[in-house]
Image (spheres, rainbow, N blue to C red):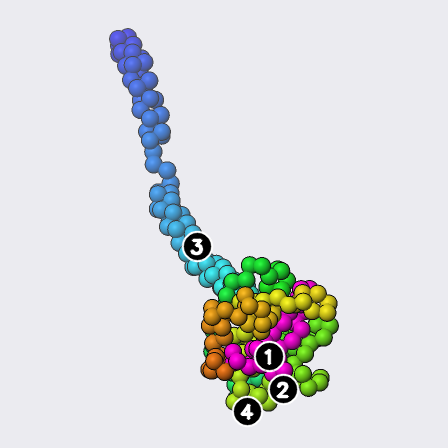
Amino acid sequence: MTRYPRTRIWLLAIVLPFALLAAACGEAIEPIDGDAPGGTDGEVEDAAAVEPTTDGDLTGTDDADAAALAEEQHAEEQHAEEQHAQEQDEVAGAVEPVGEQRQILSSAPGNDCSASGHQVTLVPAPDLPDEVAALRVLLIDAALRCDEQLLRTAMDESDGFNASFGGEVDALGLWWTLEEAGEQPFLRIAEVLATTPGVVEGSDGPIHVWPRVSTGAPEHTTEAAWSEVTWIEDLVAAKVQGDGYLDWRAGISDDAQWRYFVRGD
């Protein structure tokens, strides 16, 4: 009888620790609440379901930015166009009188200026004073463009401009009358001033004259000099006139004033 209790005690001493260890391990690996896995999945699914979608918002933002950029570009283009138009108006305003005069010229007797559409070859004149050379070019350009305003300005800026030996006349009115009669005074201004100049002594100093044959000086009445007078049809008759060359001629003083454009004696 005394053997069995001891045996049981011994068995309990051996088995009990293992039983306690097994029980502890069982609690450690016992699954968490059965709803947890499902709940976790649900939470993940819910998170995916409620995750904000930004594609639509980004697209909307892109569209708004594009629209704003397009509007800004349109405003800049419109501003540039307005600025360009303003600049054009300023330019037009600066030359408005000239434009009006050109319009008058185009509707003047004969319908057009005789110099329209013509070109001339400018004979070099290196000995001309710079201001005289500049006025020469300006008058040629004005005549070829039938720019009545520039021609009148050049006359007005002269101390004394002569268009006729018969007394004071409205030069432009006279020239338009000649245009109507079939003469070509505007074209002649350009053709005459394009030739080689000569020099004569005026009451107020040297005057540069065109064409050079009009000076009557031997060095200015050579065959080469006469060959420049292309608007004269009968050079033989022109050469034998008592007072020399008497056709269209122009003079600019040494201080760059347009003194005359006349013909005849």
Which of the numbered marks, if any, corresponds to residue 54? Answer: 3
The magenta span reads: 238-265
Task: Judge whether 163 appears above or below 140 on screen.
Answer: below
Graded by Cα atoms within 10 Å as few (under 14), some (14 to 19) or many (20 or more), the crowding at tag 4 reads few
Occupied quadrant, residue 82 = bottom right
Comes first in the chain, label 3 or label 1: 3
Q: Which residue is drawn at 54% across and 65% down?
A: 219
Of badges 4 and 1, the one in the foreground is 1
The residue at which mark 2 appears reads as: 174
Comes first in the chain, label 2 or label 1: 2
Q: What is the distance, in whole Å, between disc 4 and disc 2 at their CAs?
A: 11 Å
The residue at which mark 1 appears reads as: 243
Residue in the foreground of this view, choosing between 68 and 114: 114
Q: Where is residue 10 in the image (x, y as percent from the top left)?
A: 29, 11
Task: Judge whether 26 appears above or below 185 on screen.
Answer: above
Comes first in the chain, label 3 or label 2: 3
Q: What is the distance, in whole Å, between disc 4 and disc 1 at their CAs?
A: 26 Å
Comes first in the chain, label 4 or label 2: 2
Q: Position of residue 83 (x, y in %)?
A: 59, 67
Q: What residue type is labelled 1?
A: Asp
Residue in the foreground of this view, choosing between 93 and 52: 93
Q: What is the distance, in whole Å, between disc 3 and disc 1 at their CAs?
A: 101 Å
Q: Residue at x 47, y 76 (%)?
A: 230
Comes first in the chain, label 4 or label 1: 4
- SS assignment at label 1: loop
Q: What is the distance, in whole Å, between disc 3 and disc 2 at their CAs?
A: 84 Å
Q: Residue at x 73, y 72 (%)?
A: 159
- SS assignment at label 4: loop
- SS assignment at label 3: loop
Residue 256 lies in the magenta stretch: yes
